[in-house]
Image: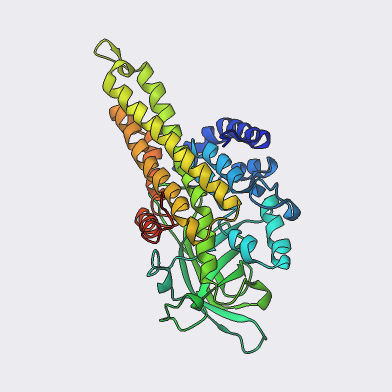
Amino acid sequence: MDFELSSELAELQDTVRRIARDKVQPRAREIDTTGEYPADLFETFAKAGLLGLCIPEEYGGSGAGILGLVLAVEEVAKYSSTAALMLLLTRLPTGPVMIAGSEDQRKRYLPGIAEGTQRAAFGLSEPQAGSDVMGMRTRAVRDPSHEGAWILNGLKCWMSGVAQADWFTVFAKTEAPASRAHDSITAFIVERGWKGVSVGRLDEKMGVRGVDTGELVLKDVSVPPECVIGEVGGFRLAMLGLNSMRPVVAARGIGLAEGALMYATNYVKEREAFGRTIADFQGIQWELARLATEIEAARLLTYRAAALADQGKFTKEWVPLLSMSKYYATELAVHASGVALQLLGAAGYMKDHPTELWYRDAKQLTIVEGTTQVQLGLIAKGLLDGDIWWD
C-alpha cells in the first residue's frame, strides 16, 4: 500500500500550490467583497491546464482524473472556496457526459471545457426538489414536429455557475410529473443560446460569492435527440454523477480547513497575552492538534474516495465510502473555520482577517451535492445492506 503521490500528481500539486499562493490568495477578499466573477483566475486556470484535469486526453484534457482534480481543488480552497468551485464545475456537469454520453457528445462538449473556451453548469435541484430529487417537476415531452426530439419546460434553481455557463446538464421528468419511478427522469444537454433558455433570479448568498448561483428557466425548449445523455429514463445517471463528485466536494472542505488552521496557527504564535504567546497555552495547543489530526483523517478518506472514483467504483456498493469523505471533510470545514475564528477572538470576527470569510463559506459545503444528512443516510444504508462490513 503506497501513500505517496505519483511524480506527475506531486508536480501538479506543487504547481497548483504556487498558483494558489500567488494568484488566488491576493484576490480572495476582493472576490468576496465585490461578488464579481473572477475572470482573471479562470484565465489563469485555463493557461495552467487546470480546467481539463478530469477530462481524458482524447478530448483535450490531461487525464489526471478525479484524484488530480481533488489535489488542485484542495490547494485552491485554502484561500478561496469560490475559486475552488470554478475548478469543481469542470467535472460536475461533464460527469454524466463522460459516464454515459455518446462519442459525438464527448467530442462536441468536453474539449471546450478543457480549453476554457466554454463553461457548463448542472441542473438537478428545483424549489420543491432538493434532497428529494424525485419531486422534480421540470417536464420533457416528445416534440411532435421533430422525430426523437423533446420539449422541456420547468425551472431549475441553486445552480452554481448558471450565469456564466454556455451549456447545461439538465434532468427532467420524461413521464408524468407525479411519477416517482426512477426511469421517469432523463438527462439532457441544453445550450444557452437555444430559444426558450434564460437565466432567472440570481441568489444573494451568505458566502462563496463570485460564482453566481441562481435559476435556469426552460420554456418550450426544443432539445434534439443527439442531446439526450445516455438512455431515456436515466435517473441512475444523476446518482452516478453525484457519487463520483463526493471526493471533489470533500477536497473543498479539506482545503478550507487547512487554510483556516494554518492562518490561526500563525496568529497564535504571534499574539501575546498574559506575558506569553497564546500558542504557549496547552488548551490552544490541544485545539490545534485535534484539527491537524482531523484534517489528516479527512484527507485519507478523500484521497481513497478519489482513487475509487477513478477506478469507476461509484456504484451502489461503493457509495458509503464516497459519502464518508464528503460528510467528514465538509463538517470538518465548518468546525475548523469556527475554531480558527474563535482562536483569533474579536479579531477573527472582523474583515481584517479571512477567518470570517472561511466561516461563511464553509457552511455551503454541508448542503451542496447532498446534505450531511443525506450522506449519513447513505452511509447507514450501506452498513445495513452489508456494503460496509468488517468480517
Residue 85 place in picture, x, y as percent: 52, 48
Residue at the outermost right position:
58
Residue 12 place in picture, x, y as percent: 64, 36
Q: Indicate how the structure is coloured in the image.
A: rainbow
Q: Quadrant of residue 180?
A: bottom left
Q: Establish if 184 lies above or below 110.
A: below
Q: Establish if 217 lies above or below 259.
A: below
Residue at image location 57% in from the left, 46% down from the top: 307
Residue at the outermost top position:
275
Residue at the outermost front position:
391
Foreground of the two, 70 or 256: 70
Q: Establish if 88 lies above or below 107.
A: above
Residue at image location 42% in from the left, 27% down from the top: 263
Residue 257 can be seen in this image: no
Residue 47 place in picture, x, y as percent: 69, 42
Residue at the outermost bottom position:
144
Residue at image location 29% in from the left, 31% down from the top: 342
Foreground of the two, 313 or 376: 313
Q: Quadrant of residue 293?
A: top left
Q: Establish if 204 lies above or below 143.
A: above
Residue 199 place in picture, x, y as percent: 52, 65
For the N terminus, the quadrant is top right
Residue 158 can be seen in this image: yes
The answer to whether residue 147 is left or right of residue 85 is right
Count of labels shown? Answer: 0
